[in-house]
Protein backbone atom coordinates (compact mmCIF):
# COMPACT_ATOMS: atom_id res chain seq x y z
CA UNK A 1 0.00 0.00 0.00
CA UNK A 2 1.13 3.53 -0.73
CA UNK A 3 1.81 6.15 1.88
CA UNK A 4 -0.71 8.53 0.39
CA UNK A 5 2.04 11.05 -0.36
CA UNK A 6 2.35 12.19 -3.97
CA UNK A 7 5.56 11.19 -5.70
CA UNK A 8 7.88 14.15 -6.14
CA UNK A 9 9.51 14.81 -9.48
CA UNK A 10 12.65 16.72 -10.29
CA UNK A 11 12.18 19.03 -13.22
CA UNK A 12 14.98 20.63 -15.18
CA UNK A 13 13.48 22.21 -18.25
CA UNK A 14 15.39 22.53 -21.49
CA UNK A 15 14.11 24.33 -24.58
CA UNK A 16 14.61 22.26 -27.73
CA UNK A 17 13.98 22.45 -31.46
CA UNK A 18 13.35 19.35 -33.52
CA UNK A 19 12.32 18.32 -37.01
CA UNK A 20 10.04 15.38 -37.72
CA UNK A 21 10.26 13.09 -40.75
CA UNK A 22 7.20 14.79 -42.30
CA UNK A 23 8.98 18.17 -42.23
CA UNK A 24 7.17 19.57 -39.19
CA UNK A 25 9.33 21.81 -37.00
CA UNK A 26 8.71 21.68 -33.25
CA UNK A 27 9.81 24.07 -30.51
CA UNK A 28 9.13 23.13 -26.92
CA UNK A 29 10.48 22.15 -23.55
CA UNK A 30 11.59 18.78 -22.21
CA UNK A 31 12.50 17.65 -18.71
CA UNK A 32 16.10 16.46 -18.81
CA UNK A 33 16.08 15.51 -15.10
CA UNK A 34 15.00 11.98 -16.04
CA UNK A 35 17.11 9.78 -13.74
CA UNK A 36 20.28 10.34 -11.73
CA UNK A 37 23.20 10.23 -14.14
CA UNK A 38 20.93 10.77 -17.16
CA UNK A 39 20.47 14.52 -17.31
CA UNK A 40 21.49 15.49 -20.84
CA UNK A 41 19.27 15.88 -23.88
CA UNK A 42 21.16 13.09 -25.65
CA UNK A 43 20.47 10.73 -22.71
CA UNK A 44 16.76 11.47 -22.96
CA UNK A 45 16.60 10.87 -26.72
CA UNK A 46 18.85 7.81 -26.70
CA UNK A 47 17.08 6.11 -23.75
CA UNK A 48 15.33 3.05 -25.15
CA UNK A 49 12.70 2.21 -22.51
CA UNK A 50 10.48 5.11 -23.52
CA UNK A 51 9.51 5.21 -27.20
CA UNK A 52 8.09 8.71 -26.84
CA UNK A 53 9.65 12.06 -26.05
CA UNK A 54 7.35 14.23 -23.93
CA UNK A 55 7.40 17.94 -24.71
CA UNK A 56 5.45 20.77 -23.09
CA UNK A 57 4.73 24.39 -23.99
CA UNK A 58 5.01 23.32 -27.63
CA UNK A 59 4.66 25.20 -30.91
CA UNK A 60 4.38 23.24 -34.19
CA UNK A 61 5.30 24.79 -37.53
CA UNK A 62 3.97 23.02 -40.62
CA UNK A 63 5.83 22.48 -43.86
CA UNK A 64 4.08 25.09 -45.98
CA UNK A 65 4.01 28.28 -43.88
CA UNK A 66 0.92 27.13 -42.03
CA UNK A 67 -0.07 29.03 -38.92
CA UNK A 68 1.78 27.74 -35.85
CA UNK A 69 -0.19 25.41 -33.59
CA UNK A 70 0.34 25.48 -29.83
CA UNK A 71 -0.02 22.52 -27.46
CA UNK A 72 0.44 22.26 -23.70
CA UNK A 73 1.80 18.71 -24.02
CA UNK A 74 2.94 16.69 -27.01
CA UNK A 75 4.16 13.09 -27.17
CA UNK A 76 6.52 12.49 -30.11
CA UNK A 77 7.54 9.00 -31.22
CA UNK A 78 11.35 9.06 -31.19
CA UNK A 79 11.52 7.14 -34.47
CA UNK A 80 9.89 10.15 -36.20
CA UNK A 81 12.60 12.62 -35.15
CA UNK A 82 15.11 13.59 -37.87
CA UNK A 83 17.13 15.88 -35.64
CA UNK A 84 16.90 17.59 -32.27
CA UNK A 85 18.96 20.41 -30.81
CA UNK A 86 18.97 22.37 -27.57
CA UNK A 87 18.28 26.10 -27.66
CA UNK A 88 21.80 27.41 -27.13
CA UNK A 89 20.59 30.89 -26.17
CA UNK A 90 18.84 29.79 -22.99
CA UNK A 91 20.54 30.45 -19.70
Image (cartoon, grey):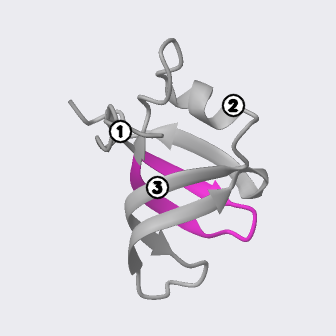
Q: Is residue 26 within the magenta segment? A: yes
| x then y, percent, for residue 54 | 52, 53
Q: CA distance from mark 2 to mark 3?
A: 15 Å
Q: Which residue is mark 2?
A: 47
Instruction: Look at the picture and state if 81 lies above or below 64.
Output: above
Q: Earlier in the sequence, mark 2 or mark 3?
A: 2
Quick check: 45 left or right of 65?
Answer: right
Quick check: 10 left or right of 2?
Answer: left
Q: Residue at x 41, y 28 (%)?
A: 33
Q: Secondary structure at mark 2?
A: loop
Number of marks:
3
Tag shown at residue 29: none
Q: CA distance from mark 1 to mark 2?
A: 22 Å
Q: Residue at x 58, y 84 (%)?
A: 64
Q: Which residue is mark 3?
A: 55
| x then y, percent, for residue 83 | 65, 46
The residue nearer to you, when weighing 35 against 20, is 35
Magenta stretch, overall SS? strand
| x then y, percent, for residue 77 | 71, 58
Residue furthest toward the top?
37
Tag shown at residue 7: 1
Q: Earlier in the sequence, mark 3 or mark 1?
A: 1
**Which residues fall within the magenta stretch?**
16-29
Amino acid sequence: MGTGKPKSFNVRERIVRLKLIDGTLVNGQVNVAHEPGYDRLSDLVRETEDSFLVLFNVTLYGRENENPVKHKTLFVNKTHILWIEPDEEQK
